[in-house]
Image: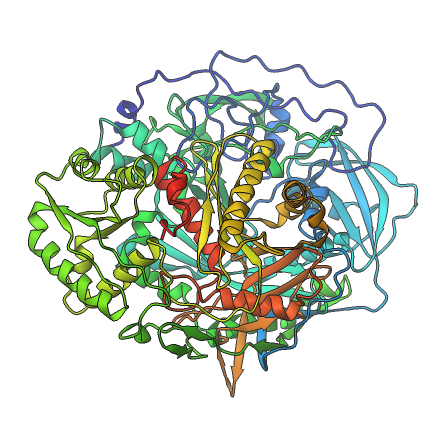
Amino acid sequence: QQSKLLSMSQQPKGRGRARGRSGPRPEEVSSGASFAPAPAAPAPAPVAAARPAPPPGLSAQAGVAGPPGDQQNTGRGVGRAVERGGAAQQAGDPGQLSERMAGLRVGGEASGDRGGLQRKLLRFQLANVRPEGAAGKKGSSGAPVQVMTNFVRINTEDKWCAYQLAADFRPMLGAKPLREKLLNDAQQVPKPFVYDGGCLYTKQPLAPAEGVKFAASIKSWSGEVAIRQVGVIEKNTPQWLHLMNVVLGKTQSHLNMQMVGRNFYYPDQATKLPQHRMEVWPGFEMAIKPSDGPLMLHVDVSHKIIHMSTVLDVMYDMYNRNPGNFQAAATDALVGQIVLTRHNNKTYRIDAIEWDKRVTETFPRYNKSTRQSEEISLAQYFAQTYNVNLSDSEQPILMSKPRKRDLPPTKGGRREQAENVLLPPEVCFMTGLTDEMRADRNLMKDLATFTRIDPSTRCGKLVKFASTMAQNRECQRVLGEFGLAVAPNAVEATARQLAPETVQMTKPIRVDPERADWDNALKGNGMFQPVNCKNWIFVYSQRDEQAAADFCQKLSRASQSLGMSFGEPYVLAVAQDRDQLWVKTIEENIDQGLDLVFCLLPSNKKQRYDSIKRLCYVNKPVPSQCVLTKTIRNPAKVMSVATKVALQISCKLGGVAWAVSIPMKRTMIVGMDTYHDKRQSVSVQGIVFSLNETFTQYYSYSPIVKGGKAELHNRLEVGFNLALQKFREKNGDLPTRIILYRDGVGDSMLEEVKNSELLQLKQSLSKIYGERMSSLGFKAIVVKKLVSSRMFRKQGSQLRNPAPGTVLDDVITMPNYVDFFLVSQYVNQGTVTPTHYNMIEDVNDANIKPDQVQQLTYKLTHLYFNWPGTIRVPAPCHYAHRLAYLVGQNLMEEPSPQICDRLFFL
């Protein structure tokens, strides 16, 4: 098998030597400290026509792992890859390469760079998005509930300050561990200190105040170091929070933890799953974050799934299965994946596969014994440095681009350039789960025993971790040097449980406050507003004729209990299971009066599904429903399936399954989410607009945006214009209040959404409303599902998940935000995850207080018609998500406007 990789690549191998950097430019220093004019850079090393693969990680940004990599992307990345900026090539200095290699170690860290501190501070700089004039965010409705959180208090000295020192090395010393050791050994540096790679932080001021400069040497590096004091760190500032996290990170090395990404893990406590060729590393996600409470350490249980298979193993397997299309298949499957290199516990994203590179190609390396440059291959480097013998000399090379956010900005505000990182597939271990793995029930069941942790166990783990930190002498010493101490208990808070809702069908249903679902009540309870399906076609594979006939009867019986009815279908049997024949059969039978196309599919083949949906939603607009044959095979469950399918069909035709009481008149609620297709560099903006007073009927709009912000703003204006016209046609006038729930916004995008997207949106609304704009109430609420904050309900001596409707708007919320956490869904396994809501705009709508916003949000989680229960987000948000995903993943075109006044995307 070791020779297979030669045949995998059809391109000739490249030969030559690597080019490294010639050392830092005069302004490329690790901080603001500086010397007199810098010495001239050494002459560049000779370069051959083609460059080989260097050792991993020696990019200019990483600075700790090996010579810089190739700059050329030989093939356009597909799959989930994103273009993240190329890098200019620069001449190499063997001495510099040697020093970078000296910094290699397990758990290696990135070196400091100019602008690095500013990037780090952004994590702790809260976006300025609080609505003007916002009085408060705390509500009062509901019953008080005591909860534990996954936050631990950090005690600090009352009078606290620290000093920030800049350190500059001339010439540049690339490896952070070496820089830190040199500073630790230097008498001129005040002790104790912590070092983030660019700046030192100490409780003692620098003496003399104007700074010090001294000669130093370590290993084969010798030069000068300049230290100067650049600031005083005060409490409650972004710099203070950054320093707290640097100190926190230093304590973890004393707990035998390894940092992978931003989280910390125990590799020595890994649990192996040999049947799946995986292992699970236990660990914690932790950070000291700003909050409305005291200074707190956020801690949450984390697990890292590491495959025992390397990327090379995956390549072998793919080649054995499909040798003819191997390169395209491997590129599609691997590009965009995150891999772990165990020699330094670093993660990289695969951005391309360099098929014309080999591990036998050489690069110049500085030999400390002979003090000369010598040629060494990547395979030799790994054998000598890590005692890792690469088994296949013909394996290609993986290329990882530095992320733009990790690159230091220049004085002009643009990002610096940095070399790409090249990695041998044999040292890269797969991480995470593919869609195929997620579909493996046995695998997911085995993983759930580790990752799906109940509240008592989860809280117990974090309290034990906090207690270990508080009692560990070395941790106490590191924290104590900066006036800190960890409390060994989880922070408690008072949440509120909102009153349970009454769901309106033909009979009112009082929702169980503990489970918040009404699945059992669907039987014998009619829909709130049913719509019949009279004229429809039933398409099935000829071999499934009996199953189709049986399900058609079940569908008719189930619909009667819902208060709707199905007419006699026009049945169409597809003789051969070919995609084109399915589409042709449907297309030939679609006419103007058709209510529904129903397809009983023999398999979940994506291409066929996409073709059917594109035909029904783009070319010949008509609602469609696809059901897999295997879904209706179980006799014990077929009636339940038929009931839910009938309900879904009625909603696609314009019906309303159920409703809840929401006493808001002339209000439009908008849900917005985004689907990003990274393969084609386009995005789909899914937007739904409520049209009636029960917020159960919607107009949808889903523009495919290929350009920048200007195109998005123009398309949003068109969408709101169309939706408001529909609202006026249905209600006789425009809404007096618009409430926008915006999903798909990361923390770094908050200010952009508020200051650009919402500003443009309000300008568009002013064109429609004219003078009435001054009386239009407008709220915008950002919805964030990916949060790691947790709540655990205290129930006697036990901890349980909070009941649906639990709101927490204090202690762990963010200062200067109008925000709250809401648990709206019920989970019967593991720990429930709350959803975070942040109101970033509130204009002319003072009558709707935070209490009403929280209650409205919870009510809306009841109105998703695909599930007879509450969900994690308001229904308009999830409808927008379903719409954007359908258009981006299946249609690849915008749906016909003729079908956009119904929930066709359910």
Q: Is residue 472 visible?
A: no
121 sits left or right of 267 in the view: right
Residue at figure coordinates x 58%, y 59% from the top left: 666
Q: Dividing the image into 4 quarters, which one contains the N terminus? A: top left
Residue at figure coordinates x 42%, y 73% from the top left: 503
Which quadrant holds residue 258? bottom right
Residue 635 position in % (x across, y down): 14, 67
Front position in the image: 416 or 122: 122
Residue 889 position in % (x across, y down): 37, 41
Residue at figure coordinates x 85%, y 47% from the top left: 231
Q: Is residue 458 above or below residue 11?
A: below
Residue farthest to the bottom, as pictured: 796
Front position in the image: 502 or 476: 502
Q: Is residue 139 above or below residue 430?
A: below
Q: How is the image coloured?
A: rainbow
215 sits left or right of 507 in the view: right
Residue 833 position in % (x across, y down): 49, 65
Which quadrant holds residue 166? top right
54 sits left or right of 652 in the view: right
Residue 647 position in % (x across, y down): 30, 62
